[in-house]
Image (cartoon, rainbow, N blue to C red):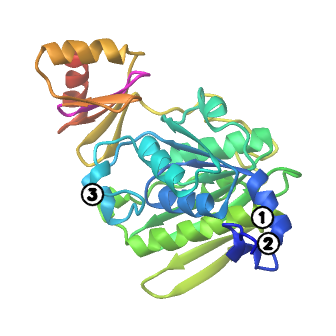
Amino acid sequence: MSVKSRYNRQELLSFIGKSGQQKLLEGSVAVVGLGALGTVAAEILARAGVGKLVIVDRDIVEITDLQRQLLYDEGDVGKPKALATAGKLRRINSEIAIVSAAADIDRKNISKTVGKPDVVLDCTDNLETRFLINEYCLKNKLVWVHAAAIRETAQLMAFDFRATNQQPCFSCIFGNSAAEGTCDTVGVLSSATAIIAAMQATAAIKLLIGFAATPEMLRLNVLQNELTKIAVKKNPNCSSCGKDSKYNYLGGRKTKSAVVMCGRGSYQIKGKTVDVAKLKLRLLRMEENVADFGECISFRNITLFKDGRALIKADSAEKAKADYARYVGA
């Protein structure tokens, strides 16, 4: 009796087959953001046999994440999402390559961290990073898939810059948009995030096996059971891909502030590179409780990464900066 491939059930699909499965095994996807969208999309792609997954996230798992971030459990609370996800995916499929980065994507590290995969998935929760991904993919002629969800609604669109620059880019559509809130402030239904993330993973699979991206946005309302297709057009005056285009985010004209609020009562501070092992010893001598996750340490209200970036629970940005200065240095 022959041993069936672990991917047998999807190889039976006529549009995949063995040849399509081989393309998946040879393919690579970068998943930027490992929250409600990224955890679902990354798990689907790992189970589907995508040969290499690059997974990136700046945050740690919190108890409020468990309502919608389906890959995590209570034992993951406090751990960096990139490391927790990598461990789960390797247990799900040990035959594929998993590259993880506990990093905050910016114009200086995006090339090294994301690289040039076959597909980039935007599973982030802020417009600045999305604009940066858009410009990075434009410049490097990559294909990427945007997804987002809030309240009971979600949206999805693929942008393919591999062969032509005639398709609209993210800035064509959202160039003058302001955030309408986040799940931290207005909430989100976990079914909305799970459905749109599954569709995002499906879009990545389709692109890897040869399907073309279509210039339309999908809008989903799970409460009303509505799925709408919206045609979008290229903006000739777009700041990113128009005739007088400038890479505002990739070029550093627009940047993130040093102190960023990641959620209610949580701030990110980008500081100098820190000798985490040395700081850990100093904290232990002070009889502080320190959890060591390899890429970062956690103590009191602070999670500190090797690059000096810190996530701090505080009532204000001023208090977060004060705590950073007290334990890490100005």
Residue 35 shows in this picture: yes
Question: CB of mark 2 within 8 Å of CB of mark 1?
Answer: yes
Work out whether residue 133 or residue 26 is closer to the camera in this orientation and state it: 26
257 horizontally vs 303: left or right: right
Report which residue position mark 2 lands on. 16
- Vertical placement of residue 98 versus 231, above or below: above
Give amino acid for label 3.
Thr
In the rendered image, the quadrant that contains the N terminus is: bottom right
Report which residue position mark 1 lands on. 21
Q: Residue at x 72, y 36 (%)?
A: 246
Report which residue position mark 3 lands on. 64
**Direction left: furthest residue:** 287
- Vertical placement of residue 19 versus 1, above or below: above
What is the spatial separation of the Cα atoms under label 3 and label 1, in whole angstroms? 36 Å
What is the spatial separation of the Cα atoms under label 2 and label 1, in whole angstroms? 6 Å
* N-term mark: 2 or 1: 2
46 horizontally vs 180: left or right: right
What is the spatial separation of the Cα atoms under label 2 and label 3, in whole angstroms? 38 Å
Q: Which residues are magenta?
A: 300-309
| Local secondary structure at mark 2 | loop
* N-term mark: 2 or 3: 2
Q: Residues within 10 Å of mark 3 (few under 14, many from 20)?
A: few
Question: CB of mark 2 within 8 Å of CB of mark 3?
Answer: no
Q: Position of residue 90 (x, y in %)?
A: 53, 49
**Direction front: furthest residue:** 1
